[in-house]
Image: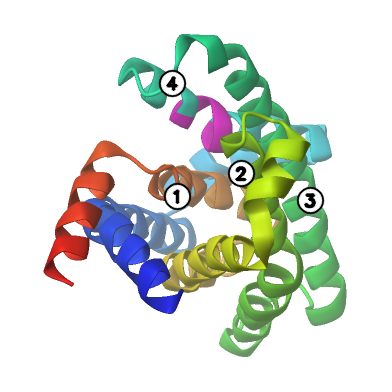
Amino acid sequence: MFKQVWVRFRACLMANLTVGFAIWLVAGLTCFAYYEYEECRQSLNFFKELKNSWGFAYSALFTAFFGGMLPYLILLFRKSIPKRKRINWFLFFLFFWAFKGVEVDAFYRLQAMFFGYSAHPITVLKKVSMDLFVYCVLWSGPMTALCYGWKKADFKWRKYAQSLGWGNFAKETLFLLLSTWIIWLPALAVVYSMPADLQMPMFNLILLFFVLMISVGKRSEEFEEKCLKSG
């Protein structure tokens, strides 16, 4: 199981590694510019005010757009979605990521209540650790694997239950956790270094790459086949 998970993870990682570094660089530079340059701070305050005004609605709409709609449109453009599944996939991407946006926003607020609003390195370390090794392990990873597995089974619970098994579920969850730990470790350090009202906008920016990574594309499939053949 671990070998299969590692092969799949390595395929996705190698196929998208350049994009990943670019996203980390953009996120890091955005965070640096926010604290160092008044012009950048004023520009980003637009999203801060929007987040303050809309609250959870902002998190739902923007996360649905960055995490769901953009990847959906890219898959649609690449003709990776069968015609008979387009509506179901559209609704899944829309509602799953809208709900996820509200969930993540609530979790960020809860973290702030426990650990404070400071961007001190110790505070950031506590939030990153709680996020990656508690929230993701106990809830986010398993639930994402469950929902995407249901989508893969054409949204039929009986079909999904028959093909699920603890082995398959564990492999999907482990794959997501590996992806999360590698991709989101530096990313979350940037997210939690931002002011509270700008954490969701930064999360949305990084989320786009992550969703594209776990949506198995042609490049990652080709690399995976090569890895399997080479053992």
Name the disc covering residue 81, or none: 4
Residue plotted at (65% across, 80% down): 133
Q: Of discs 1 and 4, which sits in the foreground? A: 4
Residue 11, percent from left and from top: 27, 58
Point out the stretch of residues depicted in magenta.
Answer: 66-71
Question: Which of the 4 image quadrants contains residue 108?
Answer: bottom right
Q: Of discs 1 and 2, which sits in the foreground? A: 2
Which amino acid type corresponds to the residue marked 2 in the rendered image?
Tyr
* Above or below, comparing residue 98 to residue 182 in the picture: above
Which amino acid type corresponds to the residue marked 4 in the rendered image?
Ile
Residue plotted at (27% across, 52% down): 16
Name the disc covering residue 214, or none: 1
Q: Which element type, helix, strand or loop, lies under badge 3?
A: helix
Name the disc covering residue 103, or none: 3
Within-10-Å neighbours for mark 1: few <14, some 14–19, many 20+ = some
Question: Which of the 4 image quadrants contains residue 126?
Answer: bottom right
Reading the chain from its start, which is encountered first: label 1 or label 4? 4
* Above or below, comparing residue 134 to residue 8 in the picture: below
Q: Nearer the viewer, residue 115 or 31?
A: 115
Residue 184, percent from left and from top: 49, 66
Q: Which element type, helix, strand or loop, lies under badge 1?
A: helix
